[in-house]
Image: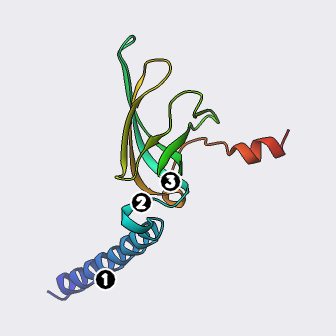
């Protein structure tokens, strides 16, 4: 009986600790949303879904995106590449989601899911760092 009590107590402590962490992350993210639900200029973490009908390619990624004046302006790929205004017309994302078709005919759905500090992307190469190393 003593073992069960200790196990329950330990589980409760862990649950409370995890609950506080998620509250802190979400409050940091909420600080980046300006007045009237609009996003402050900067980099955010987003779920990016991609569909290219000519090949049937359908993928979803977690990527960093840039927002300027409530428009989605750049999508950064983990390999150091990006999509910008030369590939699509910047689109309003003030409600947290944007859908557009690129210059190559691929359809994208971008949904903001957090701040850039919370974003985990594999092999992401920061353009500023890459330029400094050249």
User: CB under 8 Å between callouts 3 and 1?
Assistant: no
Between marks 1 and 2 in the image, the one whose residue lies nearer the viewer: 2
User: CB under 8 Å between callouts 1 and 2?
Assistant: no
**Which residue does the numbered mark 3 point to in the structure image?**
44
Residue 104 to residue 116: above or below: above
The N terminus, quarter of image = bottom left
Q: Nearer the viewer, residue 101 or 78?
A: 101
The image shows residue 114 at horizontal and vertical percentages of: 43, 58
* Numbered disc 3: secondary structure: strand
For the residues marked 3 and 2, what is the alpha-carbon distance in whole angstroms?
Answer: 13 Å
**Which residue does the numbered mark 1 point to in the structure image?**
13
Whichever of callouts 3 and 2 sits on the residue coming sooner in the sequence is 2
* Numbered disc 2: secondary structure: loop
The C terminus, quarter of image = top right
Between marks 3 and 1 in the image, the one whose residue lies nearer the viewer: 3
Residue 129 to residue 88: above or below: below
> Residue sitting at 83 percent across and 43 percent down?
133
**Which residue does the numbered mark 2 point to in the structure image?**
38
Mark 2 burial class by Cα count in 10 Å: few <14, some 14-19, many 20+? some
Q: Nearer the viewer, residue 20 or 126?
A: 126
Whichever of callouts 1 and 2 sits on the residue coming sooner in the sequence is 1
The image shows residue 69 at horizontal and vertical percentages of: 52, 53
Mark 3 burial class by Cα count in 10 Å: few <14, some 14-19, many 20+? many
For the residues marked 3 and 1, what is the alpha-carbon distance in whole angstroms?
Answer: 32 Å
> Residue sitting at 25 percent across and 85 percent down?
9
Between marks 3 and 2 in the image, the one whose residue lies nearer the viewer: 2
> Residue sitting at 37 percent across and 70 percent down?
22
Whichever of callouts 3 and 1 sits on the residue coming sooner in the sequence is 1
> Residue 1 shows which numbered tag?
none
């Amino acid at each position: 009986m003593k073992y069960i009590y200790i196990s329950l107590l330990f589980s409760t402590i862990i649950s409370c600790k995890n609950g506080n962490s998620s509250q802190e992350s979400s409050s940091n993210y909420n600080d980046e949303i300006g007045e009237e639900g609009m996003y402050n200029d900067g980099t955010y973490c987003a779920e990016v879904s991609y569909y290219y009908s000519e090949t049937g390619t359908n993928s979803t990624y977690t990527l960093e995106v840039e927002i300027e004046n409530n428009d989605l302006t750049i999508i950064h790929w983990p390999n150091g590449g990006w999509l910008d205004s030369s590939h699509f017309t910047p689109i309003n994302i003030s409600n947290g989601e944007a859908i557009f078709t690129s210059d190559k005919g691929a359809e994208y759905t971008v949904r903001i899911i957090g701040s850039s500090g919370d974003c985990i992307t594999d092999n992401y190469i920061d353009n500023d760092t890459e330029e400094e190393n050249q």
